[in-house]
Amino acid sequence: MIEIAMRTANTVVMSGVDSSEFVRNAKALAEKLDHLGITLSEAGAVRIEAADGSFLGAVSVSGAPTGEDDEKCVRKALNAVGERLMFGDM
């Protein structure tokens, strides 16, 4: 599960968008990149940005029944701490 979370987070860092959005918009490219073993084109990783919109990184979790459920977990956690960390909208 840790490797899955790391690879979906790498997908966000490399593409600059949530992993689920990357899969929707670049399916053919996503499948090719996954073979490199660095990225994983599945939902579950979310882009983190500062209030000014600048890219900070990604948060990813793995272990829920679906990638969509993983992504919901990430968003809930980021929304819970977002104000304290001065993030923009998640």
Image: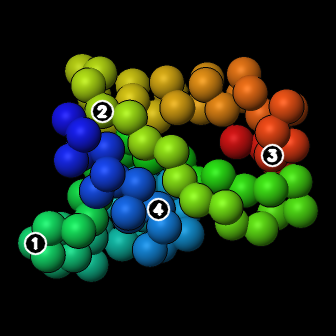
Residue at image x 23%, y 45%?
A: 4
Secondary structure at numbered mark 3 = loop
Mark toward the start of the polypeptide (3 vs 1): 1
Kindly identify the amino acid type of the residue bearing the numbered disc 1: His
Mark toward the start of the polypeptide (2 vs 3): 2
Count every numbered label the image shows and give the total: 4
Q: Are marks 4 and 3 in contact (CB under 8 Å)?
A: no
- Residue 12 circle label: 4
- Residue 62 circle label: 2
The CA distance from mark 2 to mark 1 is 19 Å
Q: Nearer the viewer, residue 43 or 50?
A: 50
* Image quadrant in which you'd find residue 40: bottom left
Q: Residues within 10 Å of mark 3 (few under 14, many from 20)?
A: some
Mark toward the start of the polypeptide (4 vs 1): 4
Secondary structure at numbered mark 4 = helix
The CA distance from mark 4 to mark 1 is 16 Å
Give the image location of residue 9, x and y in percent: 41, 54
The CA distance from mark 4 to mark 3 is 17 Å
Query: Can residue 38 be seen by looking at this rendering?
Result: yes
Q: Residues within 10 Å of mark 2 (few under 14, many from 20)?
A: many
The CA distance from mark 2 to mark 3 is 22 Å
Mark 3 vs mark 1, foreground winner is 3
Kindly identify the amino acid type of the residue bearing the numbered disc 3: Phe
| Residue located farthest toward the left when viewing the structure as drawn | 35
Kindly identify the amino acid type of the residue bearing the numbered disc 4: Val
State the residue position of label 1.
35
State the residue position of label 3.
87
Q: Is residue 79 left or right of residue 21?
A: right
The CA distance from mark 4 to mark 2 is 15 Å
The CA distance from mark 3 to mark 1 is 33 Å
Q: Is residue 29 left or right of residue 23?
A: left
Residue at image x 10%, y 72%?
A: 35
